[in-house]
Image (cartoon, rainbow, N blue to C red):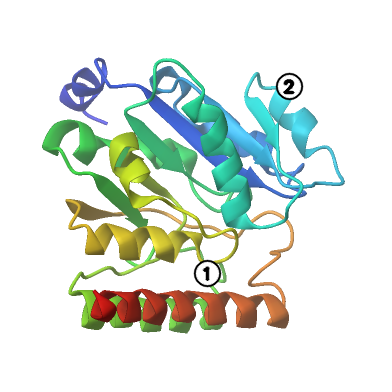
């Protein structure tokens, strides 16, 4: 990282991080450890009904734990955002990443930089454009991702390469999206609504490695099917809503 880049972030706006987590006691601590905490105000981890020591790993690192009993990626994100909305002052930027150590937390700076310096409203960390460890992305994930981004480009006219979880968005833009999906469709809902609202968007390359532990989605046939069904369903649902207006 250059000296100039460090200097530009010395006066960074208020940044909060959201990490949804379910049974990630072996990974979530490492995720928090790798984040550039000097740039952050709150690291909010939503324990989504874990039966292990996920919450304690977070507390041991002086991060914030909130709890959401209703299972679902989106439900966990919404709960964490509810906590942030009650914070004063409100943040300028929200960063989302997973708790399984597949994302590299130190790359958070690459996501917030375009927002801080070039007034982008949302930045997606693209695994497709970055370095992916062998075996980190399954073939169903790759094909599903390619199909979903192709359909978004075809229907909404916005080119994405990835639906990756590592992303940054201004808090004001996020509030305008009125996010609601409680499950697998959280990331694609955000990207569709951002496209429809013509947010200033950018993708940056990010690294991706094999997660720690077993995936609750891509690690099971049911998870892959349900995620694909939900993602494609949302793409067509919002396209239908667009035509009705």
Q: Is residue 213 visible?
A: yes
Q: Is residue 42 left or right of residue 52?
A: left
Between residue 106 and residue 175, name the one nearer to us.
175
**Residue bearing the label numbered 1:** 134
Direction left: furthest residue: 118
Residue 116, above or below 19: above
Q: Quadrant of residue 221?
A: bottom right
Q: Secondary structure at mark 1?
A: loop
Direction front: furthest residue: 245
**Residue bearing the label numbered 2:** 60
Residue occupying the point 30% across, 81% down? 150
Residue 220 locus on image (x, y percent): 72, 76
Other-residue count near label 1 (Cα within 10 Å), few / some / many at <14 / 14–19 / ≥20: few
Residue 53 locus on image (x, y percent): 83, 37
Other-residue count near label 2 (Cα within 10 Å), few / some / many at <14 / 14–19 / ≥20: few
Q: Secondary structure at mark 2?
A: loop
Q: Quadrant of residue 240?
A: bottom left
Is the C terminus in the top left, top right, bottom left or bottom right quadrant?
A: bottom left
Q: Quadrant of residue 212?
A: bottom right
Of labels 1 and 2, the one closer to you: 2
Q: Is residue 67 left or right of residue 240?
A: right
Q: Is residue 131 visible?
A: no
Is the N terminus in the top left, top right, bottom left or bottom right quadrant?
A: top left
Residue 101 locus on image (x, y percent): 59, 48
Residue occupying the point 47% across, 55% down? 165
């Amino acid at each position: 990282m250059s000296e100039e880049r460090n200097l530009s972030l010395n006066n960074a706006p208020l940044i909060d991080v959201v990490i949804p987590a379910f049974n990630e006691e072996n990974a979530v601590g490492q995720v928090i450890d790798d984040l550039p905490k000097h740039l952050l105000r709150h690291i909010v981890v939503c324990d989504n009904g874990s039966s292990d020591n996920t919450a304690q790993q977070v507390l041991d690192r002086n991060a914030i734990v909130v709890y959401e009993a209703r299972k679902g990626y989106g439900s966990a994100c919404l709960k964490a955002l509810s906590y942030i909305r009650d914070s004063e002052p409100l943040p300028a930027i929200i960063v989302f990443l997973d708790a399984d150590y597949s994302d590299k937390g130190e790359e958070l700076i690459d996501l917030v930089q375009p927002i801080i310096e070039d007034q982008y409203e949302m930045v997606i960390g693209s695994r497709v454009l970055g370095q992916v460890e062998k075996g980190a992305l399954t073939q169903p994930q790759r094909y599903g991702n390619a199909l979903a981004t192709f359909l978004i480009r075809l229907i909404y006219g916005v080119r994405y390469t990835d639906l990756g979880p590592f992303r940054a968005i201004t808090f004001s833009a996020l509030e305008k999206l009125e996010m609601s999906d409680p499950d697998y469709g959280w990331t694609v809902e955000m990207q569709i609504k951002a496209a429809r609202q013509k947010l200033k968007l950018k993708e940056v390359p990010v690294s991706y490695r094999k997660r720690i532990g077993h995936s609750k989605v891509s690690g099971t046939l049911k998870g892959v099917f349900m995620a694909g069904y939900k993602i494609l369903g949302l793409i067509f649902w919002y396209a239908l809503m667009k035509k009705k207006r």
